[in-house]
Image (cartoon, helix red, strand yellow):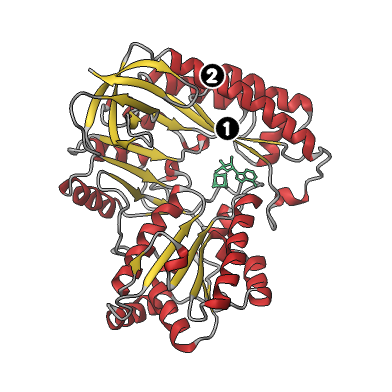
Amino acid sequence: MRIPDFNEARTRDKREYKRLVGKYNGKKYFIKTYGCQMNEHDSEVISALLEKLGFERVDNYLDADLVLLNTCSIRENAHNKAFGMLGRLKHLKLDKKDLIIGLTGCMAQEASVVDEILRDYKFVNFVCGTHNLNELPSIIDKSIESNKQQIEVYSREGDLYEGLPVVRTNNYKAYVNIIYGCDKFCTYCIVPYTRGRERSREKEDILAEVDELIKDGYKEITLLGQNVNAYGKDLYDDYNLGNLLEDIALKDIPRVRFMTSHPWDFNDKMIEVIGKYKNIMPSVHLPVQSGSNKILKLMGRRYTRESYLELFHKIKDTVPGVAISTDIIVGFPGETEEDFLETMSLVEECKYDNAFTFIFSVRRGTPAEKIKDNTSLSEKEERLQRLNEVVNKYFLENNQKLVGTVLNVLVEGVSEKKDMYYGYSDTNKLINFTSSKELMPGDLVDVEITSAKTWSLDGKVK
Ligand code: 5AD
Ligand code: SF4
């Protein structure tokens, strides 16, 4: 592993970068993104870097000269998908010898993955870690010029890079990173290892990016971070997510979102600000993971069922019309039927508007790997099914309560059947609707809700 010296890396990169602009004009790239919004946003930066080199994006990997997989490690499933794609690319490369294949993202930070690539995937041209994306242009150039496999992964994070280019996939909705990494070290989670320690961006840089987006006509920005509620802790004594949200809400931007929130870092100031400003969307993603205090402790979540519920109700009581969503893991090692029933009863109390439910997936090198697990996979699957039935019941019930109300919707486009528009409400619900007036993506309209389904609502523009 090479020892990082980021100051040097930055200056070298800037010089090299100039040399590389336009060098690959006419070549085509394909990028496949796995995992969360952080990865989606990284792919927007990667695309911009590649396009500066001259690469042009294609939607089919068979047409590409360069294929990049921006990977995710969160669960085994994501890991297997990326390796499945590498299998397909191996075949393709038999016919297309010049094809360049690269891997970035969280899997690139895992020593076991890099070992496997070095050993069994020699056709992969390069691996670039999450901490040195800025070096991607020179890594690609070196792997093309030298025809040798390039593995450039720093195990520790360095300074943040401001000013990297970005090609946004959308011209009315934008992601803005506010904090990178995670210091929570939940015992099941690989993110603190693949994404490094918590590092906030300077508030001036964030506000300048928001101003730029407003100038470009963006309607909605989503502040991103593994844990946005830790924003500012590493930089300021008295400036946190609440202050940042307030500074952004005072600008001329119709919609501000933020995700994800760790319950442990939520404070009253943040809740108050979210409730106070109309352009901060009343939608909070508040992962609970489990309703059992025993399991929460084993997970290292730093809150109890009781303190979570207190926070949950405080948010519900302070933010008018708020929708709260969550993440839940079933089958964590040591989870008994009684523990699981505690999760079920918590869901009965919270009646979430949305929930992402997962079976625990053991990640190599995390503390949870060592906890004894007596529950069979079939039992875990059965728990997941029971949990999904309850969460779905509440999605539908919550949606049914909205029939007859009017929701503000940001238009995304026309549905597949082409007979309806679709978009998302302020509470982030998917709305399919009709309109006698022609609408464009990015328009904000008031929609009267006429019927409810489990995962969406139907309506018409008033
Ligand atoms: N197994 C299953 N689910 C996981 N998550 C994170 N790590 C794991 C794991 N090892 C889930 C958590 C988290 C969401 C992003 O992914 O619920 O909130
Ligand atoms: Fe993973 Fe926990 Fe950090 Fe979320 S808060 S990224 S679950 S370690």
Q: Residue at x 82, y 44 (%)?
A: 372
Q: CA distance from mark 1 to mark 2?
A: 16 Å
Secondary element at image label 1 = loop
Judge by depth and name the residue closer to the eye, 331 or 3: 331
Which quadrant is the N terminus positioned in? bottom right
Bin the neighbour count of mark 1 within 10 Å (Cα to Cα): few under 14, some 14-19, many 20 and up: many
- Residue 347 placement (x, y as % from top left): 60, 22
Instruction: Locate residue 278, reporting x and y percent.
Output: 26, 26
Q: Is label 1 or label 2 in front? A: 2
In the drawing, does residue 408 fall left or right of residue 354? Answer: left
Camera sees residue 92: yes
The foreground one among 23 and 359 is 23
Would you say the beta carbon of the disc 1 residue lies within 8 angstroms of ligand 1? Answer: no
From the top left corner, tell me how far across and down residue 58 is, in percent.
Answer: 38, 63
Q: Residue furthest left?
A: 215
Q: Is residue 259 above or below residue 278?
A: below
Up-down: is 109 above or below 180? below
Percent x, y for residue 112? Answer: 67, 66
- One can see residue 292 in this view: no
Provide the residue designation for mark 2. Answer: 394
**Which amino acid type is shown beneath numbered disc 2?**
Tyr
Residue to which mark 1 is pinned: 288
Q: Nearer the viewer, residue 315 or 460?
A: 460
Residue in the image at 79% along x and 30% along y:
336
Quadrant in which residue 43 is drawn? bottom left
Assign a secondary structure to mark 2. helix
Q: Quadrant of the C terminus?
A: top left
Determine crowd level at label 2: few under 14, some 14-19, many 20+ residues with C-alpha closer than 10 A.
many
Q: If you read the primary sequence from the N terminus, does the residue marked by circle 1 or circle 2 appear first?
A: 1
Tell me how many marks there are: 2
